[in-house]
Amino acid sequence: MSALPSYVGGKWQRPAQDGTPVHDAVTGAEVARVSSAGVDMGAALEHGRSRGGPALGELTFHQRAALLKSLASHLREHREELYALSARTGATRGDSKFDVDGGIGALFAYSSKGRRELPAGSVYLDGPVEPLGKGGTFAAQHVLTPLRGVAVQINAFNFPVWGPLEKFAPAFLAGVPSLIKPATPTAYLTHRLVELMVDSGLLPEGSVQLVCGSAGDLLDHLTDQDQVAFTGSATTAQRLRTHQAVAANSVRFNAEADSLNCSVLGPDATAGTPEFDLFVDQLVTEMTVKAGQKCTAIRRALVPAARVDEVVEAAREKLSGIAVGNPTSEQVRMGALASTEQREEVRRSLKALLEAGTLVHGDPEDFEVVDADAERGAFLPPLLLRCDDPDLPQPHEVEAFGPVSTLLPYDDTAHAVELARRGKGSLVGSVVSADPAFNREVVLGAASRHGRMLVLNRDDAGESTGHGSPLPALVHGGPGRAGGGEEMGGVRGVLHHMQRTAVQADPATLTAITGQWVPGAPRSETEQHPFRKHLEDLRVGDTVVAGPRTITDADVAHFAEFTGDTFYAHTDDRAAAANPFFDGRVAHGYLVVSFAAGLFVDPDPGPVLANYGLENLRFLTPTYPGDAITVTMTAKQITPRINAEHGEVRWDVDVTNGDGDSVAKYDVLTLVAKRSGEAA
Ligand code: NDP
C-alpha cells in the first residue's frame, strides 16, 4: 500500500518512504501508510507565506466568508464518503456526524459570522477612536491586520474532520493560510477532507496545505509571523511550546490538551427529579460518544455523598443498554477506540485510576462485542469507577482517554467547588441543578479554571447543546492543564490570527487607514443630498448640515401629550429645577432625535431604503425650550453586501445647540440601494 501524499507547494507529493502503517480501528486491516519523508517543510511554509497569504489578502472578509460557505456546501455533498472513512476510525454514524457535520457546521458558522460581524474590507477596527488631544487633531484607533505567516495546525487523532476545520475557518477568514498536520492514526480521513477542499477549486492556491506524517523539522522554520494551534497531549504541548524557534520568535502558540472535565450534580437533584435523570443521561452520553475520546468528555462526576449509590444504580442501568462493536452495525451504540495502541494507553491509565477507586460498571478484559473481533478491533466497554475518597490524587490527575469516568462524592457546595477546581484547568465543566444559588456558587467558584461552563436543568435541557459540544460561537480551550489556549469563540478566533496595532495619527490619516470617517477628518458638503446617492456614489465624509430649528415650549408640551411621556422633567418646571442636572423643564431626548431626523432627512423616494437602528446614543447637554438645534450628519462607514442589491451605511450624527455644544451624538444605521440595483 502506498503512503498518503501530502499537499504542499501547490501539488500532491508522495512520501519518499513507505511510511507507518495505520489500521482500521474495527478490523485491524491496514488502511493506509503515513509518512512525511521528503516533504520540504521550510518550502511549504514559504509557499503559504508567499502565495497563500497574498492571495487571501486580495479578498475582503466578506469574500472569504462567501468562499467558506461554498466550501461547506461542497463538503456537505461528500458527507457519505467521509462517514464511510470515519467508520474505519471506530466511529458510529452518530460519532461521524459529530465530527463531519460538526466541522462543516463550523465553516457555515464562520461564514455567517464573517458576513455579519466583520467589516466590508480586510482591516478590523477594535474599539472606538481614542481622542488623544484637546484640539481633536491627534487620535488613535486599534486596528487588526492579518499575520503574514502560516497558521500551522497540529491536530489530534480523535476529530480528523472537525479538528482541522474549526482551526482552518477562522484562519481563512482572517486572511491567513493554513498548514494542516493531522495525527497519524486517522490521517487518512483528514487527507480525504483536504483532497475535497483542494478539488473544490474554491480556495486560493497556498491557502491550505497538508502534511501527512511526522512534523519533522517543521517547527524549526517558524518565523514571528507564523503561529501554531495544537491539539493533543499535554506532554507534546509542553515540548512544542518550548521549541527553540517558537520561543526565540515569540511564535503564537495555542494549545488545547488533556482535560479532566467535571460534571456536578446539585443537592436539589434527588432521584426522580428531571435534573437527576439529565445528569445520568449526560454522563452516559459523554462516556460513550466517540468511545469517550473527546477532550470535553466528563472524566469526573461529582455527586452529593448521600446520592452516590443511586447514581451508580441509574448509570449502570443505562450503560448496560450500550451495545459495543462494529460501528456500522445498527444495534451498536459505541464503536471502537481509534487504535489498539490507544486502547492499551487507556488500559494503562485505568490501572492508575484503580489505585484510587473501584469499577462499578464494565470489565476491560471481559465484554461482548457485536459483529467484530474483540481483539483485532480496538474495543473497550464503558468503564465507570467509583472513588469514595475524592481527595485522592488519581481521579484529578489521570486522564484515561476513552469511555472512562469516575464518580466522586462531595460534602457541600464549597467542597464541590474545590473538587471541580482540582482538575487544574479544564475545557468544560457542567452543573446539573435547578437551584440558581447553587449554580451561581459553583460557576463563579470554578470559572477561573474552566474555559466553558454549562448549567443544565429542566428549563434549558430541551435546547441545551450538551456538555461535550464545543460551539463555533463560544470559546473552546481552558487554562492550565487544558493547555492555556482559546480557539473559536466567534470573531475572537479570527482575531487570534491578526496583529492588533494602536495607530496614532491625525483624523484624516486615520480615516484613510481605516476606511471609517473619524471626527475631525474633512467632510464633504455637496449640493446633492447624501440621501440621493446610491451606495457606489457615497463616500465616507459625505455630509449634510441642517437647521437651526428652535424648540418651543409648545413643541415640548405637544410631544409630552402626543407620546404620553409626561415625565416631570419635561412638564413640571419646579420639579425639573430641583433636579441637580437641569435648570428647569427640558426637551425630551427623543424629541431632539426626532427633530434631528426631521432636519436631516430628504423626504422623496430614493436609494435610502430603511433606517434599521441607532447606536451609541448619548444625550450630552440638556436642551431647553428656546434652544435652536443644528444637525450634522456624516457618512461614517459604508458596507456593501455581496450578493445583495443594497449595503449598509453608518452615519455619524452630531446635534448641537446655539452655543455649538453637542446635545446628542449617535450613529444612524441605514440600508442604501446599489445604483445598478443588481447583486455585485
Ligand atoms: P500527541 O500529543 O502525541 O499528538 C497530537 C498531535 O501532535 C499529533 O498530530 C502528533 O502527530 C503531533 N506531534 C506529536 N509529537 C510532535 C512533535 N514532536 N512535533 C510536532 N508534532 C507532534 O497525542 P496523541 O494523539 O498521541 O494522543 C495521546 C494522548 O493525548 C491521548 O491518549 C489523550 O490522553 C491525549 N489527547 C487529548 C486530546 C484533547 O483534545 N485534549 C486529543 C487527543 C489526545 P503524530 O500523530 O504524527 O505523532
Image (cartoon, rainbow, N blue to C red):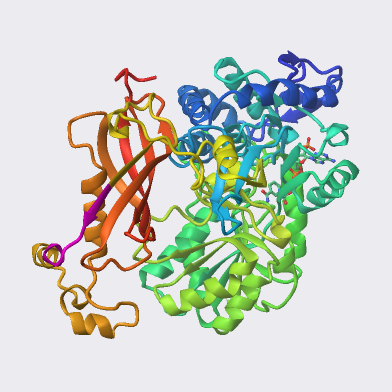
Question: Would residue 319 be visible to someone looking at this image?
Answer: no
Q: Position of residue 84 (x, y in %)?
A: 54, 27
Q: Position of residue 115 (x, y in %)?
A: 45, 35
Residue projecting furthest to the right: 244
Quarter of the image for residue 587 reads bottom left
Find ligand 1 in the image and state its quadrant: top right
Quarter of the image for residue 417 reads bottom right
**Which residue occupies the foreground of this view, 173 or 146?**
146
Instruction: Name the residue: 72% across, 49% down.
Output: 255
Q: What count of labels does the image hold?
A: 0
Q: Position of residue 140 (x, y in %)?
A: 61, 50
Question: Going by the image, does 373 lie left or right of 152?
Answer: left
Which quarter of the figure is the N terminus placed in? top right
Q: Is residue 595 above or below residue 22?
A: below
Q: Position of residue 674 (x, y in %)?
A: 33, 24
Q: Is residue 566 above or below residue 117?
A: below
Question: Going by the image, does 338 lie left or right of 123?
Answer: right
Question: Going by the image, does 250 lie left or right of 589?
Answer: right
Instruction: Name the residue: 61% across, 34% down.
Output: 168
**Which residue occupies the foreground of this view, 329 or 391?**
391
Q: Which region shows up in magenta?
A: 547-556
Q: Is residue 549 magenta?
A: yes
Question: Going by the image, does 22 lie left or right of 166?
Answer: right
Question: Would residue 490 be visible to someone looking at this image?
Answer: yes
Q: Is residue 638 above or below residue 674?
A: below
Q: Is residue 1 magenta?
A: no
